[in-house]
Amino acid sequence: MTVTVRFAPSPTGRLHAGNIRTAIINALFARKAEGNFILRLDDTDKERSTQEFAQGIEEDIAWLELNWSDKVRQSDRLARYDAAVEKLKEMGRLYPAYETPEELELKRKRQLARGKPPVYDRAALKLTDDEKAALEAEGRTPHWRFRLEPRDVVWEDLVRGQQHVDAGSLSDPVLIRGDGTFLYTLPSVVDDIDLGITHVVRGEDHVANTAPQIQLFEALGADAPRFGHHNLLVGADGAALSKRDKSLSIQGMREEGLDPLAVVSYAATIGTSDPVAPHDDLNELAKAFDFGKLSRAPARFDPNELRLLNAKLLHARPYDAVAEQLETMGVTGGRAFWDAVRGNLTTLAEAKDWWAVVTGPVEPSIEDPAFCGTAGDLLPPEPWNEETWGAWTGAVKAETGAKGKALFQPLRLALTGKPHGPELKQLLPLIGRTRALSRLRGEVA
Ligand code: GLU
């Protein structure tokens, strides 16, 4: 059996930390099993789904390099859902109900007041044809409910272990709204059957849909796939994530200059028994992935922790892996520059800022012009290498008597205009004698 999974976002917004984690878990699982990862756009909600969001979602997933092997859109598959509806109607498993939302709400309130669970009472099942005709003559259009069989539904959840649900205690789910549009339940099951989905892997918020969906698979003559419901994310403070928070959107992470592999590494390791660590290879992450490692408790998503992970990833990244990106950014300092600055980066974009410090113009920050002037006079002739810094500062120390921070800090401020940064022994040869001398003399260079 070839593992086939799907990530099924609704194109009613861009991707964010919460749903991208579902995509990542599915993609890693498929990669590990050498199976298929399908992108399914759940766009049956015509009012809220847009082409722009669909395109944005594809861009987000492509940026994360979670290549999908196949893409389907639910709006292209309506005929398949209609066929399933006919089948269910013939079997007497789909029935029209005419209650208005207000009437349903009233029923719920009455049940709760009597201490009963608010389960739909199936009044619509008892309607005669004449009664239905009368209701329709009143101008009511029916919504359609799936008649559940009152039995225990059991599945072995990939994350939560064995689950039992007494379907007799559930309301018959509405599959089709009064306006004829589909709710998510039926199209999802029909697609999962048609696409040969072997494992439905999604967030815990869907666990209540599973028992009715298993009955739907069976009613439609299919074997239900395996199900796995992963833990959900909360923010660093333990509160629910806000979909509007830019630092939680994939677009925001991308604009911030974070590395896709840092995002994937982070999302794949939080809320698991593995340490949160950077992986520079999707295959390595996939190999380590296991449903058994997922915790049942909510996972904390902390944008600062993600940044830290991004920094770690960059610090370890060899020059050859970034050479092309640096070139595109106009950073032409080569290997020497990368080795000088990588330890100081949180995002790759910051390499550009350090390159600007090397190439100038830099406004030097000078408190003691005499000291910097003397240091300038002592600059050795080129060629320079990593030894130059030690030899030069040794000479400045001998001449001025300054040592430690009093020696190094004024030089750093003059040469870079900044109080912190990469090691000067590596940066100095890149800055070069001409610029170094001008900066030590207080000139913008
Ligand atoms: N469109 C649904 C969602 O985004 C898919 C749920 C599922 O994976 O079954 O929540």
Image (cartoon, rainbow, N blue to C red):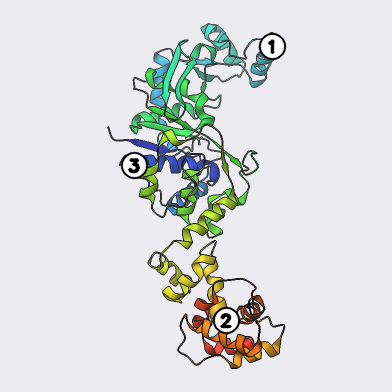
Q: Residue at x 63, y 46 (%)?
A: 244
- Is residue 445 shown to the viewer in this render? no
Residue type at the position of mark 2? Gly
At a point 63% along the width and 43% down the height, the residue shown is 242
Q: Is residue 35 left or right of residue 81?
A: left
Instruction: Give the residue at the far left of this rendering.
Output: 1
Asked whether mark 2 lies closer than 8 Å to ligand 1, one says no
Coordinates of residue 324 in the picture (x, y in percent): 40, 68
Q: Is residue 352 left or right of residue 190?
A: right
Which residue was labeled with disc 2? Answer: 360
Give the label on residue 224, or none: none
Q: Nearer the viewer, mark 2 or mark 1?
A: 2
Q: Earlier in the sequence, mark 1 or mark 3?
A: 3
Instruction: Please name the residue that numbered disc 1 is placed on.
Output: 110
Marks 2 & 1, CB-CB < 8 Å contact: no
Considering only vertical position in the picture, is 121 above or below 6? Answer: above
Q: In which quarter of the image is residue 336?
A: bottom left
State left or right for residue 380 relative to residue 245: left
Badge nearest the viewer, 1 or 3: 3
Residue 210 in view (yes/no): yes
Q: What element carries label 3?
A: helix
Quote the CA–CA distance across marks 2 and 1.
75 Å
Please, what is the three-letter code of the amino acid marked with disc 1? Arg
Place of residue 280 in the rendered image (x, y in percent of width and height, measured from the top left): 41, 55
Q: What residue type is labelled 3?
A: Lys
Q: Name the residue under label 3.
A: 32
Q: Is residue 379 above or below residue 219?
A: below
* Percent of width and height locating residue 87: 38, 19
